[in-house]
Amino acid sequence: MGRILATLQKRGAELSGADAQRALLASVPLPRSFEAALGSSGLFPLRPTTLDILQVNVGRRCNQTCKHCHVDAGPDRSEVMPRDVMEAVLAFLTRHRVGRLDITGGAPELHPDFRELVVRGAAAGAHVMHRCNLTAILLPNYADIPALLAAHRVEVIASLPYFQARETDAQRGAGVFDESIEGLRRLNALGYGRGTGLELNLVANPVGTFLPGDQASLETMWKRELKQRFDLDFDHLFTITNMPISRFLEFIDERGRTVDYMTRLANAYNPVAAASVMCRNTLSVGYDGRLYDCDFNQMLEMPLADGAPRTIFDASLAALHEREIAVGPHCFGCTAGAGSSCGGAVA
């Protein structure tokens, strides 16, 4: 994976995948642990406040291979949520009247039952959110997806690293920017982002090893630039810190930047952001039905704490509310500066 992992392996550790990532992160010398940072804010142990969002990862298949992807998704991935897990997700959503269903992947559209999940989620009374890479909806077999989303008032949360091609293509692949602009045009044509009540939000990760800029200021700039350059509109910009997981962790470790980046995150710890992290109101469901405190813990294969339900099949709302949230060094990514969540800055 990189310099630190090579050192760990020289010490005799046989590590791969999520185990290697956790070991790498645990080996980084930081000013203090994340648990200690929470303790200084009166937040340890971290516990849920409510359950507002059921975030469901329907699989790792994607038509893109992005350099910053913490899911390690791509065209070569075969993981996909089976039918029984989807049924259990919908049953939990309906039984407990969870307010929001957040569908993510990979590219969620590539799941064979994506359309049904959207329709039934909306019918259950949930506000459905779709995390879209803007290019999958251009593929012939998925060109009907935007109209389906509009028909069920689904909120679209679309990834776009920057409003210019060079930065976007550097992170997501050659030609992705032009395709993304076409995807936005199709969504705008349906009324998304244009004051119709169809919500279109963009997500931007920094193209590099630094924290996102001020979200409100960046939103103003992005709206101006996309309007002037392409006559495109959207509702909100969400800024998200690049999480030190999977491909981005490999990227910084190969360049010897892991310690510097992790130290930057740790030194930028914000107790206000820590109090509002998304794991306090969100439950993450893996494609195989296993439960996690957040999508980032899912990718590091950090299950819910002992005593909490482990799968969507045996999930109990009362037990979930009582759990202690599992944390680690990567959590500094969510509490640095203005904070970072799947809904953007939190402070």
Image: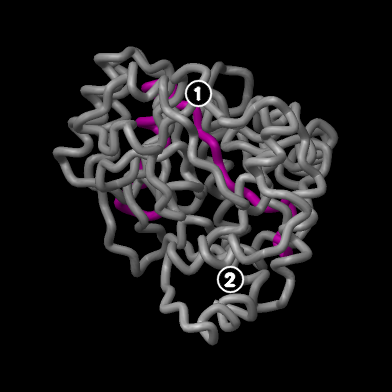
Query: Splitting the image into 4 quarters, where does residue 207 fall?
Result: bottom right
Magenta span covers which residues?
A: 139-167
Residue 199 x, y percent position in the rendering? 56, 25
Residue 233, visible in the rendered structure: no
Asked whether 42 or 274 is in front, the reply is 42
The circle on residue 289 is: none
> Which callout, 1 or 2, points to the residue nearer the camera?
1
Quarter placement of the N terminus: bottom right
At label 1, the amino acid type is Pro
Asked whether 107 or 30 is in front, the reply is 30
Residue 317 x, y percent position in the rendering? 33, 19
Residue 122 is a magenta residue:
no
Q: Residue at x 60, y 61 (%)?
A: 25
Find disc 1 in the rendering and name its residue: 48
Is residue 141 shown above or below 285?
A: below
Q: Earlier in the sequence, mark 1 or mark 2?
A: 1
Helix or strand or loop: what does disc 1 sit on?
A: loop
Query: Splitting the image into 4 quarters, where does residue 235 fall?
Result: top right
Asked whether 78 or 307 is in front, the reply is 307
Q: Residue at x 33, y 13 (%)?
A: 97
Find disc 2 in the rendering and name its residue: 250
Helix or strand or loop: what does disc 2 sit on?
A: helix
Q: How many marks?
A: 2
Q: Decide: marks 1, 2 in contact (CB < 8 A)?
A: no
At label 2, the amino acid type is Glu
Q: Residue at x 70, y 77 (%)?
A: 255
Asked whether 43 or 218 is in front, the reply is 43
